Image (cartoon, helix red, strand yellow):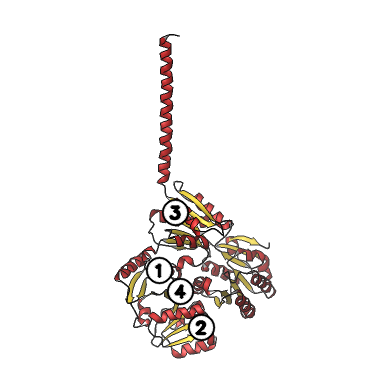
Amino acid sequence: MSLTVQLHKREKTREIFVILAIAMVWLVFSGLAKCWAKAGQPKVAIVHLKGIKPYIALGDVIEQKLNSTTTVKTFEISPGIEGSAVQRYLDKFDADVTVCVGKRAYQLCERFGTSPIVLAYNTNISVESNPFSLVRYLSNNAQKIAVILNEKSREAKDRALVIQGQRFGLKVKTKRARVESLKQLAAENDAIALEQGVLIIKGNSTTIKGGPTVAVFDGSIEIYKQLLRRCMSQLPKFDSIIDISKVKAGELKKKLRADGPSVVLCVGANSYQRCKFMENRNQVLIAVETAPIANNIEQWGTLSGVSMFANPKDCLDALDLLVKRSVIIAMPYNPKNTELLVLRILLEAEGKIEIAVLPVLNEKQAGKAITRQFDNYDGIWVIPDSTISVAAIQKFLLEKSLIKKKILVTMMHPYTKRGAMLAVSGVGGNTNELGERMVSLINEKLEDPRSIGKVVSPPASISLNVKTLRHMNYKIPQSLLNKAESIFGK
């Protein structure tokens, strides 16, 4: 073979090696570029308990609907898993926003200090985080809030509260130690927050007249007794205190009307329900528990959430369409679990639907109260409270409501499938709209982690049992049928 041919072959080989080398370099840099680009993408962690189908379905919808440039990773928590293990996984991923689906996931992530958090929640957790978000949960129209601080509180706390109040659309006025007049405080503000962890909001009344101030509470329930003590530690002395566990309903009316109070402070939801008749004459205030005003005020507002409880107004509107008459519906609840949901229902209820609340502290009390009171009301409204939603109570309500033709409305679809007339839930078969509301909150947090915390209601998911409704002699409006996601008993 000639020298020329050999050189030509060597040049060809060299060219091939050069081309391959360039290709390899290009592939390496291309891969690195993709990694760098991915590393610069916003990260979203979804955390929920393992094996719970609604949580899994919601997590899948969130992942599908998030922007394709967002890196999403799901962390499933086994019931027995150590919190430290979850924390290691989350710390390694280093998410910009953590999505917690359910109570367990939130409790873990909040303990780690993960922030900001977007929460799909099935308890009152997200609205207990601070008094400002709780004001927004209970009263969209509130504008002014007075915050009563201890004398030793530093001025820096005042400035932080004013800034945080603005982020929730509230004008904050801080005061030190004991105030002189609850009447004046109520006249000048839409809400009052006490440093020890009490929020006081106005009921549906605006009138203030001369006369004494009265506190009304249920002395048979320990958390209400503690709540009253907190109120008394930072508010002016009350002219009288009434324990409704020791006073009959008729006597309470006589007592309050005789005293002619200008301000009635109701400690807890059940006291407010007993005193609602006063709203057309005097100022009724409601005290509920919230998180104490702590040093981490700057963290307020980083938590947003979509409730897994339906908006109470959706439930009331659906019931009103069906019943079309004045009714009194009993509502059993455990103040430790669902105080805020019950209070919101009471604030929303008006017109023909009257709610009579039955506070119970355990399953045994719940069973006795429901059995004893069943015949005294037109029906029962079962809310998602773990104390009430037990098999024995479910069986009793489903059987007795059909036999005695009592209204049975719930916020959980399995009840309707088994025979309840109506359920309006925040968790339905179609999770797309709920996922969209979650994604909207996530995107807000990705754009601005310090954006205002929001509590958003889920889309109403309505189910009906037509067999039960016919048995109850109710005519189902077409408008309600059109809204129903599930219809049982056809």
Q: Label 2: state its secondary structure.
A: loop
Determine contact: label 1, label 2, CB under 8 Å.
no
Pointer 2 residue: 219
Mark 3: few/some/many CA within 10 Å (<14, 14-19, 20+): few
Q: Earlier in the sequence, mark 1 or mark 2?
A: 1
- Residue highlighted by disc 1: 132
Amino acid, disc 4: Glu
Label 1 or label 2, whichever lies nearer to me, is 2
Q: Quadrant of residue 293?
A: bottom left
Q: Is any part of residue 407 visible from this angle?
A: yes
Tell me if residue 437 can be seen. Answer: no
* Amino acid beneath label 1: Phe
Which quarter of the figure is the C terminus placed in?
A: bottom right
Q: Amino acid at mark 2?
A: Gly
Alpha carbon separation for disc pair 3 and 4: 32 Å
Q: Verify CB contact (< 8 Å) between mark 3 and mark 4.
A: no
Residue linked to disc 3:
91
Q: Earlier in the sequence, mark 4 or mark 1?
A: 1
Q: Earlier in the sequence, mark 3 or mark 4?
A: 3
